[in-house]
């Protein structure tokens, strides 16, 4: 009887020991990759108890068979599977342990489902900055609507518009406006056409001839409507000349040659180059300078700005071109958006500067705080 008891004790001990040994030997989990669009699964393993010669990770494919996904070099770690993963689909993985002779020591299967997350927690700082920007824009729009005067730094190139139109009127010469060489899908072209509306209205009020050569068909149609509406707002629809806005050519340097010919023949008193420009910027600016015209240029092309700065009287640099619409119209929505964006940029610069200083001096209190909590 005593031997029977010992025998059953050994069997039960071996059974429970094997179960606990397996639990100690392998930790194998597969979860959805956090902060992604549902195209990744994270696999974590931790082998304890003994050291296998080889660890192989397999994945079950559509045909029902397992295929090797990777051979793992370490006894513990993480592996991200991003191959052919689709959201809301379940995938099965198998971890195999082999000894030196290639015998299978241990195997385990696990299933995980990929899913897309609404919010990436790694980009919480970007969310906070966006929230601050939105609140700032809404606040300034409300302030502008309530009658509060919002300060905007003077832009010399736009302030000179009246001077340019007045000079052209006194001299009896036309005004030349070139809205860049790109189509309406470029923001610089749209910004330039916005300024054209204000300039055309002033030209209509002073009864000054306006010349607008373009090199894109869509820009042609849009510019015609803008100039026509400007003359209507000025109360002089009869003075609008449909031929004042005309198409030259889509060819870059063919267009420049045409504009240079206009400058030499018409001798405009004021030239406006506002939009996107490439190598032709220097040719246009130099020809206009040689003709003696007052020149105002603006572009967001950094490589072309030096040519405009040297050869033109006034230059709108980068974002000054995009701010022109709000600057000229004083419309509350545009003013509020402009002020809100400026505040957001100021906060961004302050935070960036503070981060650089903290990194230089090795201050990581925020990181340590998040780690502790």
Image (cartoon, rainbow, N blue to C red):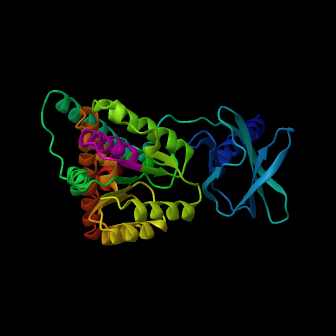
Q: Pinpoint residue 344: horizontal percent, then vertical percent.
A: 27, 47
Which residue is located at x 39 percent, y 35 percent?
A: 228
Q: Pinpoint residue 149: horizontal percent, then vertical percent.
A: 12, 37
Residue 293 position (above or below residue 25): below
Which residue is more in the foreground, 249 or 70?
Answer: 249
> Secondary structure of the magenta portion, mostly?
helix
Q: Quadrant of residue 128?
A: top left
Left or right, 252 with reference to 321:
right
Residue 104 position (above or below residue 329): below
Check if residue 180 falls in the magenta segment: no
Tally of numbered tags: 0
Which residue is located at x 29 percent, y 53 percent?
A: 348
Check if residue 198 falls in the magenta segment: yes
Which residue is located at x 64 percent, y 62 percent?
A: 74
Quarter of the picture holding the C terminus: top left
Q: Pinpoint residue 342: horizontal percent, then vertical percent.
A: 25, 48
Q: Could one spot residue 282 in this view of the protein?
A: yes
Residue 308 position (above or below residue 298): below
Which residue is more in the foreground, 310 or 114?
Answer: 310
Which residue is more in the foreground, 2 or 71?
Answer: 71
Highlighted magenta segment, given as a residue range: 192-211
Which residue is more in the foreground, 62 or 112?
Answer: 62
Report the residue that reaches farthest toward the left.
148
Left or right, 289 with reference to 31:
left
Q: Could one spot residue 340 in this view of the protein?
A: no
Q: Pinpoint residue 201: horizontal percent, then vertical percent.
A: 29, 39
Report the residue that reaches farthest toward the top.
146
Residue 280 position (above or below residue 47): below
Quarter of the picture holding the N terminus: top right
Which residue is located at x 83 percent, y 38 percent?
A: 62
């Amino acid at each position: 009887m005593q031997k029977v008891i010992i025998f059953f004790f050994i069997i039960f001990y071996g059974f429970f020991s094997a179960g606990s040994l397996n639990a100690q030997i392998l930790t194998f989990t597969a979860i959805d990759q956090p902060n992604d669009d549902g195209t990744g699964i994270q696999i974590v393993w931790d082998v304890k108890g003994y050291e296998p010669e080889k660890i192989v990770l397999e994945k079950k494919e559509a045909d029902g068979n397992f295929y090797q996904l990777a051979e793992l070099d370490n006894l513990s770690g993480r592996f991200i599977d991003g191959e052919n993963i689709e959201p809301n689909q379940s995938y099965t993985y198998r971890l195999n342990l082999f000894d030196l002779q290639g015998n299978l020591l241990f195997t385990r299967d696990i299933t995980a489902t990929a899913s897309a997350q609404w919010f990436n927690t790694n980009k919480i700082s970007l969310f906070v900055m966006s929230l601050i920007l939105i609140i700032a824009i809404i606040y300034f729009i409300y302030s502008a609507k309530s009658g509060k005067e919002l300060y905007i730094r003077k832009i010399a190139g736009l302030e000179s518009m009246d001077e340019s139109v007045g000079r052209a009127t006194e001299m009896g010469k036309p005004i030349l406006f070139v809205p860049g060489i790109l189509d309406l899908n470029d923001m610089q072209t749209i910004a330039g056409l916005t300024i054209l509306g204000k300039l055309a209205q002033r030209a209509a009020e002073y009864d000054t001839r306006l010349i607008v050569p373009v090199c894109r068909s869509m820009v042609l149609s849009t510019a015609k409507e803008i100039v026509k509406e400007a003359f209507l707002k000025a109360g002089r629809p009869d003075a609008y000349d449909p031929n004042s806005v005309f198409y030259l050519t889509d060819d870059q340097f063919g267009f420049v040659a045409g504009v240079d010919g206009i400058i030499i023949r018409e001798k405009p008193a004021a030239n406006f180059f506002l939009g996107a420009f490439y190598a032709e910027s220097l040719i246009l600016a130099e020809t206009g300078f040689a003709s003696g015209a007052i020149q105002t240029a603006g572009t967001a092309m950094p490589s072309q700005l030096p040519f405009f700065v040297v050869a033109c009287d006034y230059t709108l640099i980068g974002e000054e071109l995009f701010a022109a619409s709000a600057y000229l119209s004083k419309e509350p929505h545009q003013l509020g958006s402009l002020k809100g964006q400026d505040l957001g940029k100021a906060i961004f610069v302050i935070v960036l500067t503070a981060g650089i200083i903290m990194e230089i001096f090795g201050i990581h209190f925020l990181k340590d705080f998040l780690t502790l909590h």
